[in-house]
Amino acid sequence: MPAKVNHILLKGIQIYSEGKIIENGYIKIKNQKIAELGVIDELLNTNEYETIELSSHYKAIPGFIDVHIHGVNGADVMDATPEALKNMAETLPKEGTTSFLATTMTQDKTEIEKALINAGNYIETQSTQESAEVLGIHLEGPFVNKKRAGAQPLEHIIDPNLSLFKKWQELSKGNIKLVTLAPERPGGLGLIHYLKENGIIASIGHTDAVYDEVIAAIDAGANHVTHLFNQMRGLHHREPGVAGAALLRDELIVEMIVDGVHIRPEMIEFAYKLKRKEGLILITDSMRAKCLKNGIYDLGGQQVTVKDGRAFLDDDTLAGSILRLGDAVKNLLSFTECSLEDAIEMVSVNPAKQLNIYDRKGSISVGKDADIVVLDDQLDVFMTICRGAVAFKKGGKLNENH
């Protein structure tokens, strides 16, 4: 890992700032924040900065925010250890992710509580250097519908329970930021209303709701949809279902796993044409096998086989992904007519706005956290800066001329 540097100058790079692209630009980073940016001709006072020279075909874009990720590199949130979260936080910058929600899954209540306590403690004490930031917790399950369980173990699925959620939020030290639930189940609308009142994102997911039940969930305060098209009632011309409501209603921001496996490329294009850049968030939903070889792995106590880019249970049910968020961006550009600027909205801006942290993350702007991804001319992640520290650099060395 490169040595910690507090003051960094990125120089000679194309910068995707808010609403504009700066050619032959520079970014000054100081005390974990973006201190200054502009064109090279305006650059002054560089003595206190370590300069990283880059050529003009490199692009600086905002760090990626993954609001739905279970694991990577052998680690999983449900391991309930600080070492697992540290492993995730140190590995994710390789794919351009600078912050994320630690995502749980349906398990025995005791196991969920261990994971929540661990994540809450980690968030309160996490390092600010050279790793992605854990922004909070995404509670995926157990408040889902058994008919749309996917890889969520059936025996641990329960109906939405407000008193249990309040207990869990206390155990997490108030760090649950997003909850996936089935609104049609008993207690669903009541929990959604509580989440809305308390500034927590209520997400419709793993659900068999019909269209009218989704509308009721929107009215109660739901504004998010977990992995569009996957484990939800699909689109039908006499019953629009969850997918139809998600595509039609502007109140709902939808997650998509853009790996070409969970959703066919044509359906990704379909969703993009309807929701546009404002309505989509790219996620990975990745599990511990990401960055590892083909083989057999554990997910929530279940055996998952990873082979040729797919992760699946014994019955061939998809079980999360091994998708890298940087690859999701490239896939989106390939599957649709969207621009890189549009993709940035979906992988950085929208998740920051949805989490109500756009004042400090989600764009390259003076005063915001210095969460920056440098892409090469193939749009591969070349370097990632997390809160002002170089967390990943292809080849591992700084101060090379490129």
Image (cartoon, rainbow, N blue to C red):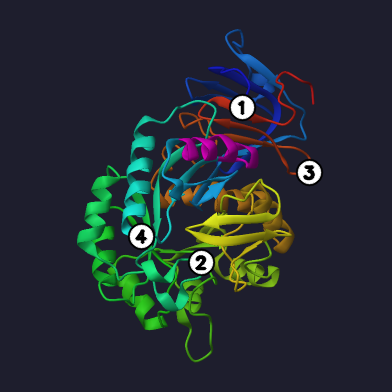
Q: Amino acid at mark 4?
A: Asp
Q: Which residue is mark 3?
A: 378
- The span shown in magenta is 83-97
Q: Position of residue 15 (x, y in %)?
A: 65, 35
Between 257 and 146, which is closer to the camera in this rendering? 146
Splitting the image into 4 quarters, where does residue 315 fall? bottom right
Considering only order in the chain, which callout, 3 or 1, is on the residue closer to the N terminus? 1
Local secondary structure at mark 2 = loop
Q: Indicate the quadrant containing the C terminus: top left, top right, bottom left or bottom right.
A: top right
Q: Secondary structure at mark 1?
A: strand
Q: How busy is the neighbourhood of tag 3: few (under 14 within 10 Å), some, or many (20 plus)?
A: few
Q: Could you say which quadrant of the image residue 296 lies in?
A: bottom right
User: Of the residues tagged 1 and 2, which is closer to the observer?
Assistant: 2
Rendered residue at 61%/13% (across/down): 44
Q: Which label sits on residue 163?
A: none
- Side (left or right) of 269 relative to 298: right
In the image, residue 249 lies at what x, y percent? Answer: 44, 72
Tell me the tag on residue 108.
Answer: 4
Residue at numbered disc 2: 151
Question: Is disc 1 in contact with disc 2, using a CB cutoff of under 8 Å?
Answer: no
> What amino acid is labelled 3 in the image?
Gln
The alpha-carbon separation of the residues under discs 4 and 3 comes to 44 Å
The quadrant the N terminus occupies is top right
Q: CA distance from mark 1 to mark 4?
A: 52 Å
Image side of residue 61 versus residue 170, left or right: right
Instruction: From the viewer's side, name the closer residue of 78 and 135.
Output: 78
Q: Which residue is mark 1?
A: 38
Q: Earlier in the sequence, mark 1 or mark 2?
A: 1
Q: CA distance from mark 2 to mark 3?
A: 34 Å
Q: Identify the residue at image location x=44%, y=79%.
A: 147
Marks 4 and 2, Cα distance to the nearest angstrom?
14 Å
